[in-house]
Image: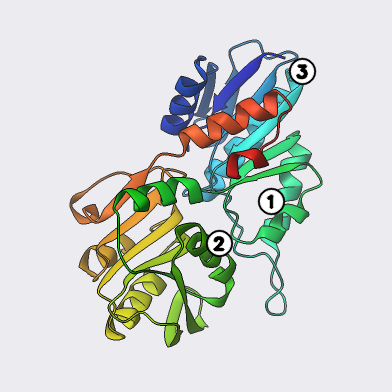
Amino acid sequence: MKLKIISGNANIELAKQITQKLKIELCEAKVGRFSDGEIQVKIIDNVRGADCYVVQSTSSPVNENLMELLIIADALKRASARRITAVVPYYGYARQDRKAEPRVPITARLVANLFAVSGITRVLTMDLHAGQIQGFFDIPVDHLYATPVLLSYFKEKKLKDIVVVAPDAGGVERARAFAKRFNAELAIVDKRRPSPNEASVMNIIGEVKNKTCIILDDLIDTAGTLTKVADAIKEKGAETVFAAASHGVLSGNARQKIQESIIKELVITDSIPFIKGDNTKKIVVLSIATIFAEAILRISNDESISALFL
């Protein structure tokens, strides 16, 4: 099958990097707007019988990017593409993955249904907010991890006395796996969340005194939790505080919070496009293009994806 990479407007630079790694051209497509704001899509290249990969994170503006992805998939389906894989480095609406209280939606499942209905036959994503979201899909999901990229970066720094910090109970498994690969200690922060996007640190389980701490999370949104956790472990005697996350959502004044915090560096990936500025000097962005390019090639050749992380 012909391999075709198509990009919406969310991750054009990442899509170009992926095509460069694969040594192919980006599929020519028009993704624009009608005068009333409706999304207009036209696939210029012939995709009949092709193995198509649509690169599009559902990051801000979330609804615009999500609709672009669905409409591109519909266009490819009607153009007789053989297989349509949604390459979604950051899967939005994932934080509402269960009924934590009465009369709330499960948006992670809703979006999964929309993917399938639009004609998408496979999903390639990275570091879902919760692993069980894979079960919401009735189509195959290939789940990648940013761990190798983050590990490589921190190993090059040759840090000493490392403790990997899970900022909440939900992130313990992720932090433990990272600490094991690093041969480092593990600490866990017990926090209470009185309201959405607001966290109160209560207790730290583990030894952080005189240690180099790496706070590890799947995403950083408002940075409220992150900066409070950093302050808490610093108060407990941590020597240096780093932070790392797969997805830098960084909404509101998150960048300013990080710049003014005691965090030495925040390391994220380019799963969400990032623009450098005066208030982002502490933020390091790592490329995930190589991992996605290799995964796409393996899917196209019917080879193992899990072998990437052995």
- Tell me what residue is drawn at x 44 percent, y 80 percent: 199
Residue 274 higher or lower than 2, as above or below: below
Is residue 13 left or right of 258 when viewed as pictured?
right
**Element class at badge 3:** loop
> Mark 1 Cα within 10 Å, few/some/many (few <14, many 20+)?
some
Picture coordinates of residue 13, whole percent (x, y): 41, 31
Q: Earlier in the sequence, mark 2 or mark 1?
A: 1
Residue type at the position of mark 3:
Ser
**Element class at badge 2:** helix
Q: CA distance from mark 2 to mark 3?
A: 42 Å
Is residue 170 left or right of 283 when viewed as pictured?
right
- Tell me what residue is drawn at x 36 percent, y 63 percent: 243
Examine the rendering and report whether any part of residue 166 can be seen.
Answer: no
Q: Nearer the viewer, residue 3 or 100?
A: 3
For the image, the number of numbered tags is: 3
Callout 1 touching callout 3 (CB < 8 Å): no
Q: Could you say which quadrant of the image residue 164 lies in?
A: bottom left
Residue type at the position of mark 2:
Ala
Residue type at the position of mark 1:
Val
User: Of circles 2 and 3, which is in front?
Assistant: 2
Q: CA distance from mark 2 to mark 1?
A: 28 Å
Task: Report which residue position mark 1 lands on.
Answer: 111
